[in-house]
Amino acid sequence: MSDETPEQLPDSAGHFGRFGGRFMPEALIPALDELDAEYRKIQSDQGFQDEFAKLLREYGGVPSLLYDATRLSEAVGARILLKREDLNHTGAHKVRNVLGQALLTQRMGKKRIIAETGAGQHGVASATAATLFGLECVVYMGEEDTRRQALNVARMRMLGATVVPVSTGSRTLKDAMNEALRDWVTNVATTHYMIGTAAGPHPFPAMVRDFARGIGVEARAQCLELTGRLPDAVCACVGGGSNAIGIFHAFIPDSSVRLYGFEAGGEGVSTGRHAASITGGDTGVLHGARTYILQDEDGQTIESHSISAGLDYPGVGPEHAWLHDTGRATYEPVTDAEAMDAFALLCRTEGIIPAIESAHALAGARRVARELGPDATIVVNLSGRGDKDVETAGKFFGIIEERS
Amino acid sequence: MGLLEIHLRQRREAGRALLMPYLTGAITGDWVDYLRAFVDAGADAIEIGLPFSDPTLDGATIQEASHVALSRGASVRAILAGLSGLELGVPLVASTYQNLVLHDGPEAFCGALRTAGVDGLIVADLPLEEADEVEQAAADAGVDLALLASPATPPPRLAAIARRSRGFVYAVSLMGTTGERAALSASATTLAGQLCESTDRPVLLGFGISTPDQAAQAIRTADGVVVGAAIMRRILDGASPADVGAYLAAMRQALDQEREPAS
């Protein structure tokens, strides 16, 4: 471990050890400086914090429940507490981030937001927040994803957002992010880029973490109240990593609490068809930060694969890269098949249909339960609900017909 | 002072406006012939793009060119091998994104540039605050790391960029990505003017310069121009080295006329 205390990271230039930073075109640096200054200001601005808390409480449905999942616990062999972020408005933890960033956008006097989205969840959340704050909203989405996630495209349009299909590169999330960055460099004077995860250039990883860290603060207090002690482990899925850093952060100083991040192992890390940047990638720079990425032997980014669109990204937030290097958190891949098995288990034991992303955390928690034994208490971040995944899951389980 | 900067200063001092055309490396099988055509048409330096899978600062044309080159199997190694021993008589400047610089480490990367006879380097996503490591590696290898300045860059920062840049300062003419534009932006003149006031290092204006007229207009404040997307658009549409050479020769002529009006 380094001498730096993780809870005080990043440093003033946005570095988490050797990760993070701001690898961006010069044209965006003044905007990032402005955002960083604003982000520092709101940390000690009680007015902002009160307004954010009020919005979360009265509009977002936060704090979310910590649910003692006894039937699941019985099946898994350890006490599982589910942090029910799936019950938030728009169906996932992401509402915390977009409300925070929308409030910030308003403070900066900008009238337009842009966002990238993969499955459409962050796009829907962004469109929602934009509507609430009267901001123009443009969402970039890979052409391939607009086809696979037509319902979320419709949702965004209903909310008044413009959805721009991106037909460059692999036509998925990473290309949508490239296109959003191109829009931003062109329109930065009027536009805030509402990045959807704890990745990208500084201050985004730290800022998105801080907007999401309420998940862990709540879960920690709720667990203490419910069980009288801290959990033995906290489990979350990791794509870009906002829900994971959101629940981990408050537990980082609690050295007795093990932190587990589960990456999308796709068809298995050894097949090359996965999205496990930490466990199956190496260091590089993508979308403004130095972190773990999936790249070929020439340094070109390679396409990720996962049944879960929300985890299907060839990079990861830099703070996770740092937590991995320091050993404070453990990252492991979970395959599509393991995730879907856990998805089915939660449906059948608790009557909760999880997002496939969150099913990766559940699958990982089953492994952790085997390791820690029946006396262990494990908090699992149920980061989103599965409504959006009904078609994918239905096909996977062969209970609905394939559409042509 | 590096070879690139010495060369550009000499040409500028001789009263010449600087012309730096751009080519995406390995865009075609005969890509090296385009470089020769650039030199014959009067290029003062040549920018070689080392294509990256995620070119966030590039517009549609150079994205497409990068994609085409990568689909043909382009890599840093292969492009540098293609440049080795060419002896074109003008300096070469590699331009790329930070991930490719970091891939084998900045020292190995800059060393490979040197070995291939490349004198300069542009990294689109490397701002001042992150530049130390690459700056040191480039200096050690005798490669000039040219920094970019943008219309949004505040004056004190412009001065720092001009001070730390080597070879030349790349003035990005507008807020946006690379690509052809109908007119030279107003911000181009302002930025080039500010830079020329704060440094005697050559200032090259790039992004959007597509026509001889725009180039001539640009050098009223800047020391020279970079022409990229306008060339790559033509090559993607099938232009031969001779075709592109003719296009650049017209630009060269416009630059020369602007510097020495017919007397």
Image (cartoon, rainbow, N blue to C red):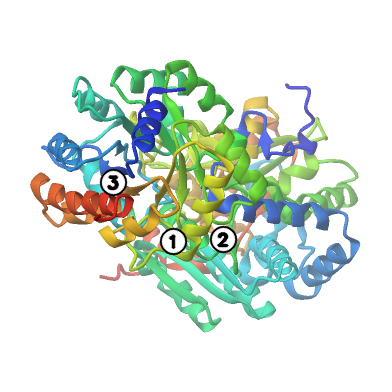
Residue behind mark 2: A347
Q: Is residue A56 left or right of residue B204?
A: right
Looking at the image, residue A51 lies above or below residue B230: below
Residue type beneath disc 3: Ser
Q: Is residue A239 visible?
A: no
Residue type beneath disc 2: Cys
Residue behind mark 3: B66
Q: What's the distance in space between the residues labelled 3 and 2, CA to CA?
A: 46 Å
Q: Position of residue B4 (x, y in %)?
A: 38, 28
Looking at the image, is mark 1 or mark 2 nearer the viewer? 1
Figure quadrant of residue A326? top right
Q: Residue at x 67, y 29 (%)?
A: A17
Q: Is residue B113 visible?
A: yes
Q: Is residue A329 left or right of residue A303?
A: right
Residue behind mark 1: A393
* Secondary structure at numbered mark 3: helix
Q: Residue at x 33, y 60 (%)?
A: B214
Total label count?
3
